[in-house]
Amino acid sequence: MKVIAVIPARGGSVGLPGKNIKPLNGVPLVGRAVLAAVNSAFVSDVYVSSDSSEILGVAASFGATGISRPAEISGPTASSESALIHTLHEVERIKGMMPDVLVFLQCTSPFTTSEQIDAVVSKLLEEEAASAFSAIEDHGFIWQIADDGTAAGITHDHTKPRQRRQDMTPRYRETGAIYAMRVPEFLAQGNRFCGKTALVPVEMPPIEVDTAEDWTVAEAYARLRDPHRLPQLKRIKALITDFDGVHTDDRVIVNEDGSEAVRCSRSDGMGIEMLRHRGLKMLILSREQNPVVKMRAAKLQMDVLHHICNKLPALDAWRTEHRLEWAEIAYVGNDINDLDCMKVCGMSFAPSDAHPEAKAISTLVLQRSGGNGALRELSEYLLSNDLIG
């Protein structure tokens, strides 16, 4: 039984621009959906369908495979089913086979868990249903306006005494978070409800993020109870950064005389300045011998150790000199020569375009790439989460 998860995530959003990659309690919406699917006992592969390369990049950093969605099914009127069908055909083209079950997840439900996904898939299989979906119990009294303009009860008879909650017939509302479908039936009908359908009650906050107001509610809830909360982090006293691929975009310009130039971000410089004003000790630790490393460090008023082939002993000596514990240090790296340092520091970060091994061991993969605002993003993350002290 081959089960895959597909997460449609368009780049455009009218109600809340950029919502799918906007961090909620440190984890972007698309990352939350990917994490829930990756940790499911049933799901073997996770795909994100998007017209945005930025969304696909963020999704990949959390373990998903990106599927580029054509423009004709990426507009605001395009159905989720169209994206799901397109992804299934792409999976068949790539893998040479169709899956048996498709799990459809939505980024707008930020508190979906792996256990809830497993409950929906289990119900689908147990009931031998064609489709299944997550729902929450709803005790609301729903009304409509009748043809004569008067109010009429839909879920209750308003002409009779009001029922107590415990006496009401249980009713359920779709969460919009999780759907599971058997692939042959889904492709035949093109509808997520493609035959015998099973309803799966789950405990989930009734929060769908489509507007700025929804986001405020989600933030408030996340502060109290968040299944995707990052590990509890201690405050740090020092920040160590690689140079190429962190302060720069990992490219070098070689002039006719053999001198080299690199590209840095002024926004990153402002981020470093913000951290310096908070009293954070900072060091650039680089393998490069290029004088530009030392000059950039002087500009940012950071300590610098460059032309360092074995970084860990050098960092250990600097740490000892400044009387710091490893737990008090954060490290930003982008390549395999940073791995040893990243593993021993209290927390570590990697730009979005870092080497896969660096991203795999990071406390948090940043949304921005090296030399393009990654350090500014990190500085705002550290300050907003009160992680300096």
Image: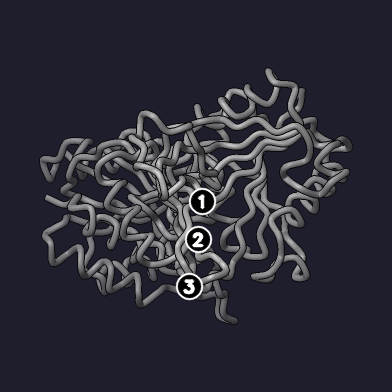
The residue shown at (48%, 71%) is 15
Give the residue pinned by disc 2. Answer: 144
Residue that appears at 25% across and 42% down:
224
* Front in this rendered view, residue 291 or 214: 214
Q: Amino acid at mark 1?
A: Ile
Q: Earlier in the sequence, mark 2 or mark 3?
A: 2
Above or below residue 121? Residue 81 is: below
The answer to whether the residue labelled 2 contacts the one labelled 3, judged by CB atoms less than 8 Å apart, is: no
Circle nearer the N terminus (3, 1): 1
Disc 2 from disc 1: Cα separation: 7 Å
State left or right for residue 360 relative to residue 388: right
- Residue kind at label 3, given as amino acid type: Val
Q: Is residue 4 visible?
A: no
Whichever of labels 2 and 1 marks the residue nearer the N terminus, that label is 2
Vertical side of 226 occupied by 154: above or below:
below
Residue to which mark 3 is pinned: 262
Give the image location of residue 347, x and y in percent: 30, 41
Viewer-nearest of discs 3 and 1: 1
- Where's residue 336, x and y in %? 50, 42
Asked whether residue 181 appears in the rendered view, the answer is: yes
Identify the secondary structure beneath mark 2.
strand
The number of discs equals 3
Q: Which residue is mark 1?
A: 154
Q: Secondary structure at mark 1?
A: loop
Whole-Å distance between the Cαs marked 2 and 3?
Answer: 64 Å
Residues at circles 3 and 1 in contact by the CB criterion of under 8 Å: no
Q: Looking at the picture, which amino acid does disc 2 mark? A: Gln
In x, y percent, where is residue 141?
Answer: 41, 49
